[in-house]
Amino acid sequence: MTAAPPGRSWWAVRWRQFRNAPRPVVRAVGANLAVAVVLGVAYLVYDVALSRGASLPGGDLRAVLATIDVLLVLALGSLLTYLLVPLPRGSSARAVRTPWSAALGLFAAVPIAYLVLVIESQILKPLLA
């Protein structure tokens, strides 16, 4: 009879899962994060300019631009994930992409788009304004 391996704490299990994340998930999160940061920085520049009293054409469009930002992160993040995350090949040499790759990108984009906007508006904007 063999002894059972020692149990790991909740934190040790989560840390091991974080360090050994599947490559498709890392690529999906990375693609969405890159898109969200680029679009978020553009939104942050606009937001800081308005808060400093700049007169920009069209007036205050922050709500519209935040909505467009989120929608673009969802669309472009899904597209990039579709392009960067093929299905496992198995014995075939050809990479196969399906709508599931884009769905993975969409599922990763939803929280990332929100978190990037929250970090930029609640942490970075007060530092720059």
Image: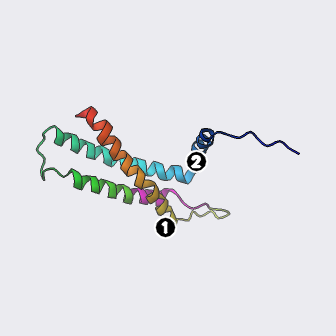
Q: Secondary structure at mark 1?
A: helix
Q: Which residues are magenta?
A: 76-88
Which amino acid lies under the numbered mark 2 shown in the image of this protein?
Answer: Ala
Q: Which residue is mark 1?
A: 99
Residue 48 x, y percent position in the rendering: 21, 40
75 relative to 101 in the view: left or right: left
**Is residue 17 positioned above or below 96 on the image?**
above
Residue 116 x, y percent position in the rendering: 36, 45
Please tell me which residue lies in front, 64 or 122: 122
Residue 71 falls in image quadrant: bottom left
Query: Which residue: 47% across, 63% down?
Result: 103
Label 2–label 1 contact, CB within 8 A: no
Residue 88 falls in image quadrant: bottom right
Residue 93 x, y percent position in the rendering: 63, 62
Q: Does residue 72 show up magenta in the picture?
A: no
Q: Secondary structure at mark 2?
A: loop
Q: Which mark is residue 21?
A: 2
